[in-house]
Amino acid sequence: MGKYDVAIIGGGIVGMNAALHLRRNASQLKIVIIERASIGTAASSRNAGFACYGSPSEILSDLSEMSSDEVYDLVRRRVKGLYSLRSIVGDHHMKYQRLGGYEIFLDKDSYQYHLDHMTSLNDALTDIDKDLVYSRAKVPDSFNYVVGMLSNNWEGQLHPGYMTQRLRFLCQKEGVVILNNLSVNSIEYGKDQTLICDQGEILSNKVICCTNGFTSKLTDEIDTEPGRNIVLVTSPISNLDIKGCYHYDRGYIYFRNVNNRVLIGGGRNQDSLTERTDTFGSNVIIKKYLVKFLQSHLLHDKSWNIDFEWSGILGFNKTKKPVIKAVEKGIFVASGLGGMGVAIGTLVGQEVANLLLQS
C-alpha cells in the first residue's frame, strides 16, 4: 500500500495538526494519515465543542495535587493551543463563538471558598493572558438551587465536526495523503517501520501514533488509559437562558447552548470504573445523572426531551500532562490529552512533529 517518510496513525486534531506542521516545515516529506473510521471519531469530532482553559474549581483542585508551576503551565498550554487552533482553522470555518465561560455552584460553602480564592487565581491567570479574569455573575432566573456563579468573557464554543472537516481540507490541500476506514493492528520495527493493517501493509521511515486513549494497543511503553464520556443534546427550548460554556464540579459536568438546545456531557466520576473503556456506548447510570441534573437545576420549568446522544473516547495519563515522546527508534507518540483535546490538541500535534523533525 505504499512507502512513506512519515505515517501518522490517527486522523483527529493531534494527527492532522502534526501532519500540517511537518508539511509546512519539511515540504519534501511524503506523509500519510491513517484513520480507522471515516473521520477522527474517538474524541476529535465527538467532543462537546468547548474552547476553554478550565473552570475555577478544576484549577483550584489541581493546585491541591500539583505544584502551581505545573498547574499554570497547563493553563498556559491550553490558552496557547486555542489561539493556535483558531489561527490555523479560522473562527468562521469551525463556527467559533466567544460567548464566555461560567461555573455554577450548588453549595454555599463551596461558592464562598472559590470567592475567597478568586483574587489570587486571577492574579496568576492574568500573568498568562490579561483577559483570563473570573468575576461574580448573576445566576439566570430559570436556574434552580444554584447559589452562585463565576464567569469570564474569554471562553468560547465551536463545532467539532466543522473543525475536523476544515483540518482535513487543509491537510489534503498541503498534499497529505489520508487513508480512511483502515485500522493499524500492530507495528513491526526495522529499518523501515511496517504498519500491519487490516487491509494490507504500509511501510514508513517514521511513525507518529496519535490515537490518544487507544495508544496502549499499539505500544506497551505508554500507559495512557481510555475514558468514555457521553454527550446529550435536548430538543429545542423556547426562551433558553443558557448562552455560553458552563461547568460544574471541577468540570465533571459541562453544558452549553447549541442555538436553542442544551448540550450536556460528562458525569464520568459517577461510574468511573465502568467508563474506563475504549468501547463506544451509553452508560444508563450516567445518562440518568445528567438528565436529573438538567431537570433539577437548569430546565425544571420547561418542556423538553433528549434528541441526540453520543459517546467519545478520551485518553488519561497518571498526571494531567500529555505524553509526547519517542518510544522506539523512529516511533513517536502523543497521547493522554485528559479531556482537553480541543484546547491543547493543536499544540500537542506541533510538539510531536517537532520531536520527529529534531530526530
Image (cartoon, helix red, strand yellow):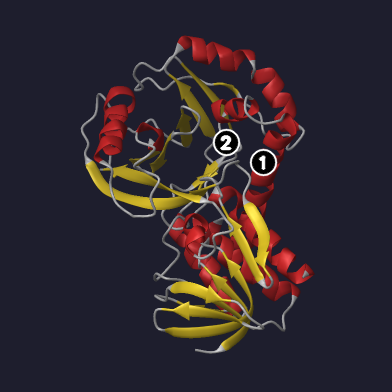
Query: In the picture, residue 291 is in which quadrant?
Result: top left
Which mark is on residue 45? none
* Quadrant in which the C terminus appears: bottom right
Tell whether 113 sits left or right of 28: left
Q: Nearer the viewer, mark 1 or mark 2?
A: 1
Q: Secondary structure at mark 2?
A: loop
- From the viewer's side, name the closer residue of 6 and 340: 6
Other-residue count near label 2 (Cα within 10 Å), few / some / many at <14 / 14–19 / ≥20:
many
Q: Residue at x 63, y 12 (%)?
A: 116
Q: Position of residue 344 (x, y in %)?
A: 61, 50
- The answer to whether residue 347 is seen in the rendering is no
Q: Residue at x 51, y 65 (%)?
A: 218
Q: Is residue 181 above or below residue 259?
A: below
Other-residue count near label 1 (Cα within 10 Å), few / some / many at <14 / 14–19 / ≥20:
some
- Tag 2: residue type? Gly
Tell whether 63 sits left or right of 267: right
- Tag 1: residue type? Leu
Q: Are marks 1 and 2 in contact (CB under 8 Å)?
A: yes
In this figure, which residue is indicated by the disc labeled 1?
Answer: 74
Work out how far the residue at label 1 is from the one at label 2, CA to CA, in angstroms.
Answer: 10 Å
Q: Is residue 325 above or below residue 357?
A: above
Query: In the picture, residue 31 is in which quadrant?
Result: bottom right
Q: Is residue 70 above or below residue 77?
A: above
In this figure, which residue is indicated by the disc labeled 2?
Answer: 54
